[in-house]
């Protein structure tokens, strides 16, 4: 099934840093496993519990030893696909 999601979700505390501004804020990174229609497994993540007043722009989200670029556009975070070697259970 295309985009079938595993209902198990992992949540880890993270820090958002503005790329073009001095903004620093805390958030939660929520992840879950999905499988493509051709069977490839991958991990998706999204930012939740972030401050409501963060402006649109470019950010870096950091958790564990990972730094992942993302964007906030029209009040919504870009959905991020994590590399297969990223194990959030070790970052928590």
Image (cartoon, rainbow, N blue to C red):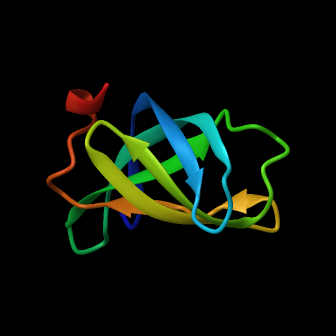
Say left or right for 15 vs 62. Answer: right
- Residue situated in front as seen by the camera: 71 or 76: 71
For image coordinates 47% across by 36% down, the residue present is 14
Please tell me in which quadrant of the rendered image residue 7 appears: top left
In the displayed structure, 87 sits above or below 90; it is: below
Q: Is residue 72 visible?
A: no
**Residue 11 drawn at (x, y percent):** 44, 29
- Residue situated in front as seen by the camera: 7 or 9: 9
Residue extending farthest to the bottom is 38
**Residue 25 drawn at (x, y percent):** 64, 38
- Residue situated in front as seen by the camera: 23 or 69: 23
For image coordinates 85% across by 45% down, the residue present is 53
Say left or right for 72 vs 27. Answer: right
Residue extending farthest to the top is 92
**Residue 45 drawn at (x, y percent):** 45, 50
Labels in figure, total = 0
For image coordinates 20% across by 66% down, the residue present is 39
- Residue situated in front as seen by the camera: 87 or 38: 87
**Residue 83 drawn at (x, y percent):** 24, 61
In the displayed structure, 50 sits above or below 86; it is: above
For image coordinates 68% across by 49% down, the residue present is 23
Residue extending farthest to the front is 22
Q: Look at the image and tell me in which quarter the C terminus lies.
A: top left
Q: Look at the image and tell me in which quarter the N terminus lies.
A: bottom left
Q: Is residue 49 visible?
A: yes
């Amino acid at each position: 099934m295309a985009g079938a999601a595993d209902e198990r979700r992992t949540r880890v505390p993270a820090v958002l840093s503005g790329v073009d501004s001095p903004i620093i804020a805390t958030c939660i990174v929520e992840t879950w496993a999905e499988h493509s229609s051709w069977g490839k497994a991958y991990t998706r993540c999204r930012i939740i519990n972030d401050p409501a007043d963060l402006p649109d722009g470019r950010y870096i989200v950091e958790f564990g030893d990972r730094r992942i670029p993302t964007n906030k556009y029209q009040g919504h975070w870009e959905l991020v696909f994590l590399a297969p070697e990223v194990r959030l259970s070790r970052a928590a």
